[in-house]
Image (cartoon, rainbow, N blue to C red):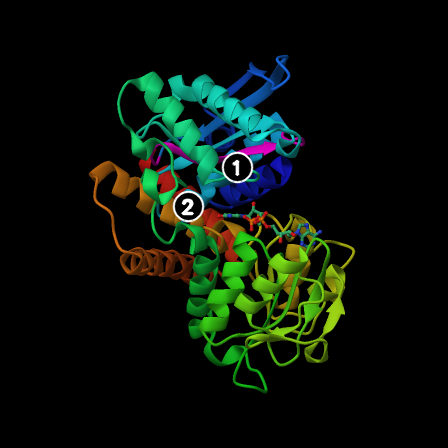
Amino acid sequence: MLESAWATIIKTAKGLGLKKNLINQLIEPEMIHEFSFPVRMDDGETKIFKGYRVQHNSVLGPYKGGIRFHLNVTKEEVQALATLMTIKCAVAGLPYGGGKGGVVVDPKTLSETELERLSRAYAAKIAPFIGEDLDVPAPDVNTNPKIIAWMLEEYERILGRKSPATFTGKPLEKGGSLGRTEATGRGGVIVLKALLSRLNSKIKTKNSKLTVAVQGFGNVGYYFAKVASEEGFKIVAVSDSKGGVYVRDGLTPETTLRCKKEKGTVAGCYCKGSICDVRYGRSITNEELLELPVDVLAPAALENVINKKNMEKIKAKIIVEMANGPVTDEAYDYLSKKGTIIIPDVLANSGGVTVSYLEWVQGKQGYWWTEKEVNQKLDEMMIKAIDVIEKKSQTKKIPLRQAAFEVAIERILGKW
Ligand code: NAD
């Protein structure tokens, strides 16, 4: 991931005529904090955990990025994600640089009290180098509003005063923002709709409704499917780690989610309207879902799922990269040349960090907006972002990903 992020930055920067030392400055993180810290386990023993906070670039503003709890966390992964946050924040037009944090841990092996002690200990460790105008962390894989609330409490205890804008992704009662939970999925649909209105007649279907397949039915996938369905798209397939469903006439995301909660998986949930019935659809594998002849494919689960092995079988006309890095560089080049429109992750899933920014603004001013106001601002900001990138892509005849990186790098250079 780090190599891929670097390769895209180097390619784009070279294309813009940047000198080597400036390219290095774009790549090298400003600071890498690598540390270990003890946590008391329930049995009285103490375990040592490894943690990171990478602060990649602060030219546009305070570092911004989530904290990940996962066994596979490495310095390189955190660094790559911090680098991509620099690009993503610049693409979204936010006054932020890029950062990311992580702890090497499988949180599923911890009790609730152990998880709380670990979260507080990590927050205490990063406390000296975060702050509302310095570095603003948020949740990421395996971290959530509850964990962020523990971290904020610990941070404020050390600081000796309130500072709600130092963390985003907080629970509502701790100063979180309305609309944050669904923001990433909603943002993806806003960008998709904006792009379709510009492409106009290029994407034609026999039916009036464009068909959509969504891989992953977690936070991002579910809200993408729900909002897209509300906006008149026909969601024909969704999946999770245990398999997927295909419903030719279009499924109802809300009922499908209810069914998933009952069964523990989306597999077998053929739900239309308020009814789930086996006659409505059929089961499909995750591989089949990616290869369906749909108008729009939204990979919203894992990285690298569209790659050398399956790229020739992808039939969707538009791919919305809702996960981080679901299309490999090789597949991106192949599909772009074939004419597939790929909305890059740094733009497609930037709705989450955009509402995090709105949460930060609300926290700093101590004034909270209604959900409608938040959604309206998200809409305006996402449309502004896609406008600039699409225009560059059209003028320079380059894929959207390259245009997005160019816009980001130009914005950073403009403030350097
Ligand atoms: P999540 O944990 O809520 O959901 C992930 C979903 O993917 C689950 O439904 C899971 O079953 C499914 N999944 C796992 N393995 C799979 C497989 N092999 N095949 C198909 N589905 C599989 O996570 P999320 O918050 O929805 O994040 C999804 C992706 O979006 C990640 O790449 C994340 O980094 C990215 N992202 C999330 C946000 C956000 O605000 N949550 C913002 C930007 C990017």
Placement of the C terminus among the 4 image quadrants: top left
Q: Nearer the viewer, residue 20 or 388?
A: 388
State which quadrant residue 257 falls in: bottom right
| Residue at position x 29%, y 29% in the image | 163
Disc 1: which residue: 143
Q: Is residue 64 magenta?
A: yes
Magenta residue span: 60-73
Task: Give the CA distance from mark 2 to mark 1.
Answer: 15 Å
Which numbered disc, 2 or 1, marks the residue that appears first in the sequence?
Answer: 1
Label 2 lies in ligand 1 vicinity (Cβ under 8 Å): yes
Give the residue at x 31% y 33%.
Answer: 164
Local packing at callout 1 (Cα closer than 10 Å; few below 14, some 14-19, many 20+) is some
Q: Secondary structure at mark 1?
A: loop
Which numbered circle lies on residue 277?
A: none
Vertically, is 215 above or below 356? below
On the question of residue 265 being in view, the answer is: no
Q: Is residue 172 magenta?
A: no
**Picture quadrant of residue 96:** top left
On screen, residue 284 versus residue 327, left or right, reads right
The amino acid beneath tag 2 is Val
Residue carrying label 2: 353
Residue 151 on image: x %, y %: 43, 28
Residue 260 point in image, percent of width and height:
63, 60
Residue 182's place in the image compared with 37, above or below, is below
Answer whether residue 352 is visible to the viewer in this image.
yes
Name the residue at the bottom extreme. 206
Q: Position of residue 190 (x, y in %)?
A: 42, 64
Instruction: Give the residue at x 31% y 18%.
Output: 159
Name the one closer to the observer, 384 or 266: 266
Mark 1 belongs to which amino acid? Thr
